[in-house]
Image: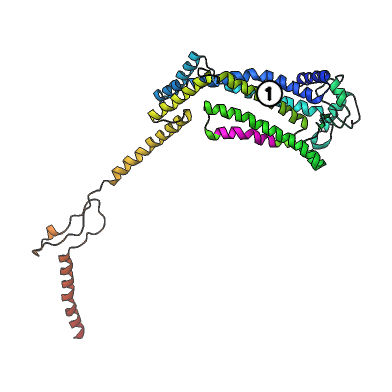
Amino acid sequence: MFEIPAGLLAWFYSLTNDYIIAIALIAAVVMAITTPLTLKSTKGMLEMQRLSPEMRKLQNEHRNDRQKLNEEMMKLYQEHKVNPMASCLPIAAQMPIFLVMFRILRGLVYRPSDTNGAKEVASATLRAIGSPDTVQGFIPRFLAKDSDLYLSLYGRTDMPSWGFNLDLSAFQAIGNGVREGLIYTLLVVALGALYFAQQKMVAARAAISPTMSPTQQKLMQYLPVFFAVFQIFFLSALVFYYIFQTLLRILQQYYITKKFYGDDESLGRQAQRAGDAAREESKKSGDSGGMLAQAKRDLAGVKGDGGSKPKKLAEKTEKPSPVTNKRVTPSKNGTKKSGASRPTPSGSSKGRPTPTRQEAEAARAKQAKSRPKSSGKKKR
């Protein structure tokens, strides 16, 4: 996995006898491999955007049937020969390449060490080269021992090219001195500027045919610049590799802009008009967004259905029930009608019924008559 690209790098060095030029050539080979995938990804993304009005209609027709919507979407993709996963190809291809080149360029200046648990790796490397003792210098990894690149680095403690020591990082150079550190830091700043220029081209193209929100466009524009800040801890050999790769990507983006956005009938312009039509259709139907917005609407509908039942129950409980008043107001004519004046206790009522006013007055009068008789008996 690592030996083939490392052997290609060694072959470029044998032709040029220069480390930086060999790194530039290997960067060109990597871009030659990934560019067809990038072009295919861009074309697939624009074709998907060109189908956005029809996709919007299907979403409106089958918004309550997710399975039917997925089936119709697949039929639409097959009819127009569109692969929705095509935009993932460059990312899937570039990540392994990034890791491989990172390991190879780091392996050029590998030094056996017993620190950080690297004793077993160091011992295996020394056994592989047939040296029982520790070598005070580089032991390049993934290279043939008879290659010019291996022989030029074996046992050395620096990797000079174009006035730079490619073994140093900008952080290490700052520790050696301000003047030396400034030169290596400017190298990282130049990489950040190239990242910004590349994403500026992508953002300008996205403004013509928007597939992301303005916030996402700004994030994608400045994210590589933040990534460049971490390059201060990387070897200068890696920084030069990323610089050459970014220069080639700028040329790649220029070609993509001319190819897909060159005239009014180009695929990018058609995708732009289709996107505008889809947004107008969304405004007319009162919808916004795509599948994510549809999922939010479905969730809101479920919540609405669930909330309707408590509302009905609340309406039922709010209906007033007839209240029976136990207190009966006496009639104006003052007649005593015990049967009519006494309230009839309901079956559900509990306890003793409340007496009427006439009954209360009669009880008080009876008590008043009985008191003098009892007091007179005591005096006698």
Question: Measured from the top left, where is residue 48 in percent x and y?
Answer: 51, 21
Left or right: residue 206 versus residue 231 is left
Let me know if residue 107 appears in the view.
yes
Q: Is 77 in front, or is 166?
A: 166
Residue depicted at x 56% and y 26%: 205
**Few, some or many residues within 10 Å of mark 1 (<14, 14–19, 20+):** some
Question: Measured from the top left, where is residue 234 in percent x and y?
Answer: 75, 34
Let me know if residue 211 appears in the view.
no
- Which image quadrant is residue 298 in? top left
227 in the magenta segment: yes
Q: Secondary structure at mark 1?
A: helix
Q: Is 278 in front, or is 354?
A: 278
- What's under tag 1, amino acid-wise? Leu
Q: Is residue 296 above or below residue 27?
A: below
- Which image quadrant is residue 185 in? top right
170 in the magenta segment: no
Left or right: residue 20 versus residue 49 is right
Residue depicted at x 73% and y 24%: 100
Left or right: residue 331 versus residue 327 is left
Question: Measured from the top left, where is residue 88 in percent x and y?
Answer: 59, 23
Report the residue marked by disc 1: 248
Question: Measured from the top left, where is residue 243 in percent x and y?
Answer: 71, 28
Which is the main secondary structure of the residues drawn in magenta?
helix
Left or right: residue 241 versus residue 296 is right
